[in-house]
């Protein structure tokens, strides 16, 4: 049995599907009830309260761990999930971490994630760590404004980073869960090119076949929008990166190709698969 946390998200959904199609028994974990592929068991649990995960881990050989908001919940002890997995007999954990753990180690959200990485390394279980940069799917935040006003609203319009397709993250995660050769691997996951928010708006317009106007937000405006959905610390850490990426954050990582044997998908590839969200 492989347990996938965050199973209804942009990474967890394709990962759950890929594992099920590979013939694995899968338990999909999310905070709310959701549809899952045929043959997949679903468990409702909040990782801010790790004990809720115990029924799934009792039968698991491997765990995909995506902490997301649970990392920052008041009083959260995310390393407790690692302890619970080890005590339950889980043999392998693949952790979705962040590139910022290495490039911005002093950001509050990165300090917390580094502690989880360290707990995993010390757990005695086999492990792999995935460190993606920015997600292409962050563009879903623009879907409503594109549909209703034909506008992308974003800060730092001409500052780019190599955003990664979540489907690539999922495919790498599946390989790390299923193949022993990735044990102890730390993979930085990026897309194949640096792309700015303004260029992303142009890619959405090209996929739609209709104009999309770019409207540049101030940092304060962007922060106000982001903190409606994510903790303040994570919003500030993210804005620090996308406003002034350092060379390591602009580097095109070879790790997707190293694991999968193909180049990563571009932002345009991601838009083509998800264009219905912007219509």
Image (spheres, rainbow, N blue to C red):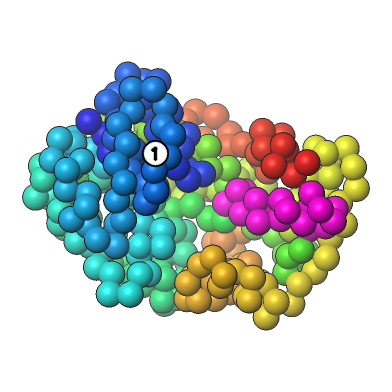
Point out residue 148 in the picture as x, y percentages from the top left corner: 81, 53
View extreme (bottom): residue? 220
What's the residue at 22%, 57% (across, down)? 50
Which quarter shows the C terminus?
Answer: top right
Which quarter shows the N terminus?
Answer: top left
Residue 162 appears in view: no
The reply, left or right, for residue 265 in relation to residue 260 is right
Secondary structure category for the residue under label 1: helix
> What residue is pinned by disc 1?
173
Give the magenta part as a residue range.
135-152
Point out residue 204 in the picture as x, y percentages from the top left corner: 78, 45
Q: Main secondary structure of the magenta part?
A: helix
View extreme (right): residue? 211
- Nearest to the observer: residue 162 or residue 224: 224
Q: Is residue 88 above or below residue 158?
A: above
What's the residue at 39%, 39% (across, down)? 173
All told, the count of numbered labels is 1
Q: Badge 1 local density, few (<14 within 10 Å), some, or many (20+)?
A: many
What's the residue at 72%, 37% (across, down)? 276
Q: Is residue 140 above or below residue 101?
A: above
Point out residue 60 in the picture as x, y percentages from the top left corner: 18, 36
- Nearest to the observer: residue 5 or residue 63: 5
Q: Is residue 235 magenta?
A: no
């Amino acid at each position: 049995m492989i347990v996938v946390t965050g199973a209804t998200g942009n990474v967890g959904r394709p990962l759950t599907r890929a594992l099920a199609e590979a013939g694995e028994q899968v338990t999909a974990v999310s905070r709310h009830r959701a549809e899952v592929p045929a043959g997949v068991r679903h468990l409702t649990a909040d990782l801010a309260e790790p004990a809720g995960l115990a029924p799934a881990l009792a039968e698991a050989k491997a765990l995909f761990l995506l902490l997301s908001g649970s990392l920052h919940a008041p009083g959260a002890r995310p390393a407790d999930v690692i302890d619970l997995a080890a005590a339950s007999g889980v043999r392998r954990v693949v952790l979705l971490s962040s590139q910022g753990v290495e490039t911005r180690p002093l950001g509050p959200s990165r300090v917390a994630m580094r502690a989880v990485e360290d707990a995993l390394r010390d757990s005695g279980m086999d492990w792999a760590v995935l460190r993606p940069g920015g997600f292409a799917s962050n563009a879903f935040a623009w879907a409503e404004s594109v549909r209703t006003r034909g506008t992308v609203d974003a800060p730092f319009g001409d500052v780019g980073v190599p955003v990664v397709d979540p489907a690539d993250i999922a495919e790498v995660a599946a390989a790390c869960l299923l193949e022993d050769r990735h044990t102890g691997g730390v993979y930085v996951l990026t897309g194949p090119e640096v792309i700015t928010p303004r260029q992303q708006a142009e890619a959405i317009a090209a996929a739609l076949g209709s104009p999309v106007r770019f409207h540049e937000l101030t940092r304060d405006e962007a922060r106000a929008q982001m903190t409606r959905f994510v903790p303040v610390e994570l919003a500030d850490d993210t804005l620090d990166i996308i406003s002034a990426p350092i060379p390591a954050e602009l580097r095109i990582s070879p790790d997707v190709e190293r694991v999968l044997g193909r180049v990563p998908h571009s932002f345009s590839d991601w838009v083509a698969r998800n264009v219905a969200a912007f219509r």
